[in-house]
Amino acid sequence: MLKQKLLLSLSPLLLLSASAVADTPKKIKNWVGGVDHLGLTVSNLDASKAFFTDVLGFKTLGNDPDYPAYFLSNNKITITLWRVKNDAKRVEFNRAENVGLHHLALSVESIKRLSELHEHLKMQNNIIIEFAPENLGRGPTQHMMIREPSGNRIEFIARGN
C-alpha cells in the first residue's frame, strides 16, 4: 500500500521531468546537457561487471587494475564500476537513511521488452528482483526494480504509449 501511494505521488514528477527542462525560464542558463557517465561503487567487481556485460549486453571500454575499475557502455550510457577500497569497512547503503544514489533507472524500449527482460533476469542466480514489471502509478508506463550482484538498485522503465 505504501509503495502504491509513493508511486502515485511520484508519477506526476516522473512524467513532468522532461517538460521541466523545457520550461526553464530564459534568464536561467542551462549549463548541462545530460548524464555523461555514472559511477557505481561495487563490492564484487567481477560479478557486477559480468552482470552489465553478460546479462545486459554492455561492452567493456577499458579498465584500471590499479584502482580497480571497469568502464562499460551500451552506446547510450557509460557506467564506471569501482571496487570498494576496504571491504572490511564497507557499509551497505540504506536508501531510506543515507544520502546517495537511490537507484539507477535504465530505459527499456517497450513494455513487451520489459517483460522479456524480466524473464531473462529471473534466470540469473546472482541478482534480486525487488518487484516484477508493474504499472508506474496508473500506467501506461511500467517499471521493475532489481539489485545487481553488489546490491545497487536498478530500475528498468518502459514508457507506455
Image (spheres, helix red, strand yellow):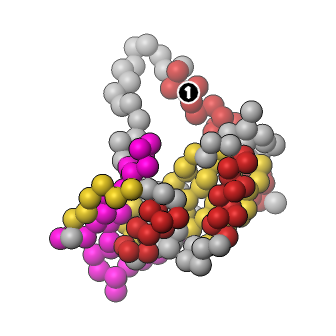
User: Residue 91 location in percent, x, y?
Assistant: 42, 77
| Closest to the observer, 47 or 38 | 47
| One can see residue 77 in this view | yes
What amino acid type should be assigned to the residue bearing mark 1?
Answer: Ala
In the displayed structure, 120 sits above or below 89; it is above
| One can see residue 11 in this view | no
As drawn, is 52 to the left or to the right of 45? Answer: right
Which residue is drawn at the image coordinates 61% and 53% (left, top)?
156
Q: Secondary structure at mark 1?
A: helix
Which residue is drawn at the image coordinates 58% and 33% (left, top)?
17
User: Residue 111 location in percent, x, y?
Assistant: 72, 46
Image quadrant assignment for residue 3: bottom right
In the displayed structure, 109 sits above or below 57; it is above
- Outermost residue toward the bottom in this view: 88
| Closest to the observer, 73 or 98 | 73
Q: Quadrant of the C terminus?
A: top right
Q: Which stretch is magenta?
A: 66-95
Image quadrant assignment for residue 44: bottom left
Q: Is residue 67 magenta?
A: yes
Pointer 1 residue: 20
Which residue is drawn at the image coordinates 66% and 35% (left, top)?
15
User: Residue 81 location in percent, x, y?
Assistant: 35, 63
- Outermost residue toward the left in this view: 66
| Closest to the observer, 87 or 125 | 125
